[in-house]
Image: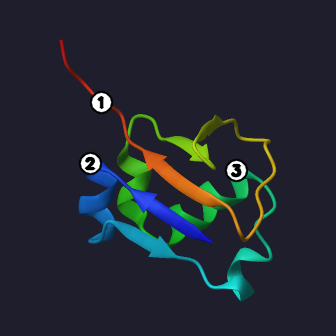
Amino acid sequence: MTVLLFGVTRDIVGSGSLEIPASEAKGLKTVEDLKTHLKKGYPGLKDLSSLAIAVNQSYASEGDPIQDTDEIALIPPVSGG
């Protein structure tokens, strides 16, 4: 499973993308499972006020299913005017 990182999520992880090995991805069934997994590995993600996730280039909600072949994007909170 490929996880693309943008903005502050990139800074927290230290890379623009992250590969979750198939052995780990197998246990991740929903977007919520993935968020929990990533926050354990990268505790700085817990400090974000919000964290949107896109699955295969479409915004996803907590209960949406994921597969180990999906492309995931972490979309941090943004500000602007």
The label number, if any, that marks residue 7 in the structure image: 2
- The answer to which of marks 3 and 2 sits earlier in the sequence is 2
The label number, if any, that marks residue 39 in the structure image: none
Q: Residues within 10 Å of mark 2 (few under 14, many from 20)?
A: few
Q: Residue at x 51, y 64 (%)?
A: 3
- Rendering coords of residue 59 (x, y %): 60, 35
Residue 28 sits above or below residue 51 on the image: below
Locate the C terminus and report the quarter of the image it occupies. top left
Q: Which residue is mark 3?
A: 32
Kind of residue at badge 2: Gly
- Rendering coords of residue 76 (x, y %): 38, 41
Locate the N terminus and report the quarter of the image it occupies. bottom right
Q: CA distance from mark 1 to mark 3?
A: 21 Å
Q: Is residue 32 left or right of residue 7?
A: right
The kind of secondary structure element at disc 2 is helix
Q: CA distance from mark 1 to mark 2?
A: 8 Å
- Rendering coords of residue 41 (x, y %): 49, 73
Which image quadrant for residue 27?
Answer: bottom right
**Which circle, 1 or 3, is nearer the viewer?**
1
Q: Which residue is mark 1?
A: 78
The kind of secondary structure element at disc 3 is helix
Q: Residue at x 77, y 54 (%)?
A: 30
- The answer to which of marks 1 and 3 sits earlier in the sequence is 3
- Residues at discs 1 and 2 in contact (Cβ within 8 Å): yes
Residue that lies at the very extreme toward the left in this rendered image: 81
